[in-house]
Image (cartoon, grey):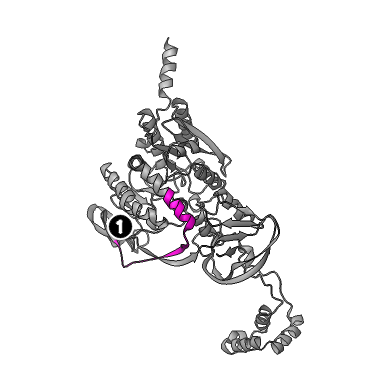
């Protein structure tokens, strides 16, 4: 009888999560997955899926909660359900979302409060390699938990810089999940770095300008105000992510337009509301977890009330993207405009450092203040581009094609060899960092020249029609000057190499003949010698100049291989 009672009591404990965040402890990877497995066993309204592998060799999981016990993406879409997807431990040291999501899921399931018009997907731990690399020292400025994971994944990649370039298996698996389930909301849970202030939760939201016009007013007038108001009601007054204009928050905050390398910027490429919740690193771990739970509930409450409008407005935005003619690639901040918000800060003081002797910044928590500060969130278009009717991409660029396919971009294979005329870019100039950034040396200061070319393409090359929901993704990745283009991330770097050269002692006669017969070349050569003293004293550079302006120079040097076919 006693053993039967023990078995019965044990069965009741399945799904009751013994979280220890109040004791400054976050679960290990094994504990977190075990708890989701328990919830799967206990509740018919929950299911734990296994997707593709991550760089550490373990699969990525997705835990889905649905009131009608239907766990098929097509089924939930046909029922007009709104989906919230929550991603945790992209930076494993920022673990408050791991605890918060388990508690959030357990509360919904145990209390049977799953809304009928919302489905929830939770990725328990994204950077699994980083979670398994558990330590307690690397986040020097953070207040707990006692042990936590490392920022880099198994390949030492920062996964919140990998949503476009997809270097990691983690990102490729998550991309499959994202496009299979097509979430309306994508929430990435984080912990801040930076200034000190009273707020427990800050937010990197979806900037309205990252959406088609039909969504912009909804974001500005409905979504963001509601979430800020809701967090006040939960007892966690929220402000935008604290990125001070100068050194301290009272100077005002910058609120940028996230590029698609980041989770919230990537989500907006497909008209998904993307959020990065940033709990404040100095607050107690339990407060950070509870504020994250409050944010998840704020989004859930908004989705419950507005699901019909959310689904409809995203449908209209998707239709708009198919026909949108002009796209902004880069933005310029308008510092003449700002909004005022109420901010709870601490007095910033300066005193000599005991370590260096120089002046140091100190926030005095005995001197709290509340006042209005400006938030600079207005931008104007800097570089814009007209959408072509088609892009043409040679099949040689397989890594690019793989990423397009992972993002559900419709590709047409040429069925025969074809000569096509269209616009192409010549890369005239680029700059690069001296140190790598997340495994790459991304290009900056990209200067282009547009030319009309007639090119031979071959059976199997790719034609990309620009009447897709993924149009903005295509533009952002295939236009070289876009903030996270494949060119910027070095996928086309071999076009920057010169393949053929000249031998000066042989080319001398050819160079002399060219100058004798080409009057325009002679004029440009003499002008360069007269205006450039270094050039005038360098024999090799003079021959190189003539070679580069001769028929012998390779015609495709620095020619970006993607063609644009205009209307």
Of residue 414 and residue 470, the one placed in the foreground of this image is: 414
- Residue 43: within the magenta? no
The correct choice, above or below, for 239 with respect to 123 in the image is: below
The correct choice, above or below, for 74 with respect to 379 in the image is: above
Is residue 272 in view from this perspective? no
Say which quadrant the C terminus sits in.
Answer: bottom right
Residue 470 in the image, given as x and y percentages of width and height? 51, 53
- Residue 369's image quarter? bottom left
- Residue 332: within the magenta? yes
Is residue 528 in view from this perspective? yes
At numbered mark 1, what does the secondary structure look like: helix, strand or loop?
strand
The correct choice, above or below, for 373 with respect to 229 in the image is: below
Residue 505 in the image, given as x and y percentages of width and height? 75, 82
Say which quadrant the N terminus sits in.
Answer: top left
Q: Is residue 331 left or right of residue 392?
A: left
The correct choice, above or below, for 174 with respect to 560 in the image is: above
Residue 517 in the image, given as x and y percentages of width and height? 71, 88
Residue range (magenta): 315-338
The residue to which callout 1 is attached is 362
Of residue 46 and residue 153, the one placed in the foreground of this image is: 46
Is the residue marked by circle 1 packed among few (<14), some (14-19), or many (20+) residues within 10 Å?
some
Q: Is residue 337 left or right of residue 534?
A: left
């Amino acid at each position: 009888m006693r053993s039967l009672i023990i078995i019965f009591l044990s069965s009741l404990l399945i799904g009751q999560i013994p979280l220890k965040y109040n004791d400054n402890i976050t679960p290990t990877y094994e504990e977190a997955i075990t708890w989701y497995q328990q919830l799967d066993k206990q509740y018919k309204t929950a299911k734990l899926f296994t997707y593709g592998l991550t760089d550490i060799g373990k699969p990525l999981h997705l835990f889905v909660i649905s009131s009608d016990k239907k766990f098929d993406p097509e089924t939930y879409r046909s029922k007009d359900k709104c989906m919230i997807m929550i991603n945790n431990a992209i930076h494993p040291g920022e673990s408050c979302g791991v605890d918060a999501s388990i508690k959030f899921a357990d509360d919904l399931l145990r209390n049977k409060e799953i809304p009928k018009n919302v489905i929830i997907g939770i990725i328990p731990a994204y950077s699994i390699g980083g979670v398994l690399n558990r330590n307690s020292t690397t986040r020097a400025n953070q207040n707990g938990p006692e042990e936590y994971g490392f920022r880099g994944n198994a390949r030492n990649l920062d996964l919140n810089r990998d949503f476009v370039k997809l270097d990691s298996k983690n990102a490729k698996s998550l991309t499959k999940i994202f496009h299979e389930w097509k979430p309306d909301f994508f929430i990435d849970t984080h912990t801040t770095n930076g200034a000190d202030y009273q707020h427990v939760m800050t937010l990197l939201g979806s900037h309205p300008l990252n959406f088609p016009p039909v969504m912009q007013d909804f974001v500005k007038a409905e979504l963001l105000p509601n979430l800020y108001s809701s967090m006040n009601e939960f007892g966690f007054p929220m402000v935008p992510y604290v990125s001070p204009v100068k050194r301290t928050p009272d100077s005002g905050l910058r609120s940028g337009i996230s590029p698609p390398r980041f989770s919230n910027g990537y989500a907006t490429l497909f008209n998904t509301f993307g959020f990065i919740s940033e709990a404040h690193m100095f607050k107690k771990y339990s407060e950070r977890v509870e504020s994250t739970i409050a944010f998840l509930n704020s989004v859930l409450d908004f989705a419950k009330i507005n699901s019909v409008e959310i689904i409809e407005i995203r449908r209209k935005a998707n239709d708009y993207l198919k026909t949108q003619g002009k796209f902004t690639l880069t933005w310029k901040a308008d510092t003449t405009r700002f909004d005022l918000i109420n901010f709870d800060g601490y007095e910033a003081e300066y005193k000599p450092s005991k370590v260096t002797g120089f002046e140091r910044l100190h926030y005095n928590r005995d001197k709290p203040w509340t006042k209005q500060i400006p938030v600079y969130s207005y931008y104007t278009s800097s570089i814009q581009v007209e959408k072509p009717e088609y892009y043409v991409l040679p099949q040689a660029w397989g890594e690019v094609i793989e990423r397009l396919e992972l993002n559900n971009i419709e590709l047409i294979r040429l069925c025969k060899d074809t000569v096509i005329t269209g616009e192409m870019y010549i890369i005239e100039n680029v700059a690069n960092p001296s140190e790598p950034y997340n495994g790459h040396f991304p290009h900056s200061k990209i200067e282009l020249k547009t030319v009309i070319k007639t090119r031979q393409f071959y059976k199997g090359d790719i034609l990309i029609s620009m009447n897709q929901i993924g149009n903005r993704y295509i533009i952002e990745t295939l236009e070289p000057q876009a903030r996270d283009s494949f060119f910027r991330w070095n996928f086309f770097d071999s076009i920057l190499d010169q393949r053929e050269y000249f031998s000066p002692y042989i080319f001398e006669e050819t160079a002399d003949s060219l100058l004798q017969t080409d009057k325009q070349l002679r004029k440009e050569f003499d002008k360069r010698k007269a205006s450039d003293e270094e050039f005038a004293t360098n024999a090799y550079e003079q021959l190189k100049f003539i070679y580069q302006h001769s028929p012998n120079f390779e015609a495709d040097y620095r020619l970006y291989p993607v063609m644009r076919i205009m209307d």
